[in-house]
Image: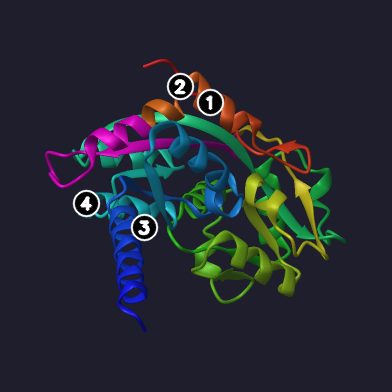
Amino acid sequence: MNQYLANAIAVATLCILLTSVQADKSPFITLSSTTSTENSGLLDYLIPKFRERTGIDVRVVSVGTGRALKLGEMGDTDLILVHHKPSEEEFMSKGFGIQRREVMYNDFIVAGPSEDPVNIRGERSIARVLSLIHEHKMPFVSRGDESGTHKKEMELWALAGVDAQRYSGEWYHETGAGMGTTLNIANGMSAYVLTDRGTWLSFKNRDGLALLFENDPPLHNQYSIVQINPDRHPHIKYTEAELFINWLTSGEGQQTIADFTLNGQQLFFPNALPQ
């Protein structure tokens, strides 16, 4: 190899290394978000638009609401995007968050075997639906993972006057997994299941499962974004995180949420209030 070629290779190698280092130093924030926003494809749609606008990337940790809040308490994330208001308010009251903004909503639905053996299709309230599942000991699959969906499910069972976890391992089954996995298990067991509409619409393995119950007010599903308190965790990227919140709740960010559709159906509905 002649000296000219050797020098050219060395320069090219150095350029590649410098580019790699610069890429690693690109500004980014960490967002701990629910599996529903990840599974639906919403974040894959939103984040490139924010990055194009600001040059800041968003690295997503997809976990349930309970785990996302725990990561926020430990300072292992800059922001959390979750959907269980009582847990969020407790998080704020303990001083772990510095601001909480409602961003968007959709709703929960009940899916189950297409033949619907207890005929929940004809019912008018989620309390009655769950009471029927309990009375007939029909298989029901729960995430059982302290996610926002699981917390909502527990509230709905309480509304129906049923302690479902008492029957764990009998007709009530807990997966300890995300929504997609839980839907797959429900399908395999011909069981009923509570899921958010966004994950349901993006779920591919629906043969045998059908949407059986929807549109009851207690099934409302509000999402909020919370910024971690830098007084608790000084390493938090406060400025970049605030930029993301401001963009997400701005007219542009809210329109971007509204524009996200799957097979012509809108999955999330923006509802951020002015600051």
Mark 1 lies on residue:
254
Q: Residue furthest bottom?
A: 1
Q: Earlier in the sequence, mark 2 or mark 4?
A: 4
Q: Secondary structure at mark 1?
A: helix
Label 3's element?
helix
User: Which residue is outermost to the top?
Assistant: 274
Q: How far is disc 1 from disc 2 in space, using C-alphas?
A: 6 Å
N-term mark: 3 or 4: 3
Above or below, 104 against 252 in this view is below
Can the viewer see residue 177?
Answer: yes
Specify start and end residues of the magenta stretch as a single range: 218-244
Residue 30 magenta: no
How many marks the image carries: the answer is 4
- Residue with the mark numbered 2: 250
The three-letter code of the residue at mark 3 reads Arg
Q: Nearer the viewer, mark 3 or mark 2?
A: 2
Kind of residue indicated by mark 4 = Gly
Whichever of callouts 3 and 2 sits on the residue coming sooner in the sequence is 3
Q: Quadrant of the N terminus?
A: bottom left
Picture coordinates of residue 98, whole percent (x, y): 23, 33
Residue 230 on the magenta span: yes
Q: Nearer the viewer, mark 4 or mark 1?
A: 1
SS at badge 2: loop
Mark 3 and mark 2: span between their CA atoms?
27 Å
Say which mark, if any, is on residue 154: none
Question: Where's the C terminus, which quadrant?
Answer: top left
At label 2, counting other C-alpha atoms closer than 10 Å, the crowd grade (few under 14, some 14-19, many 20 or more) is some
Which sits in the foreground, 135 or 103?
103
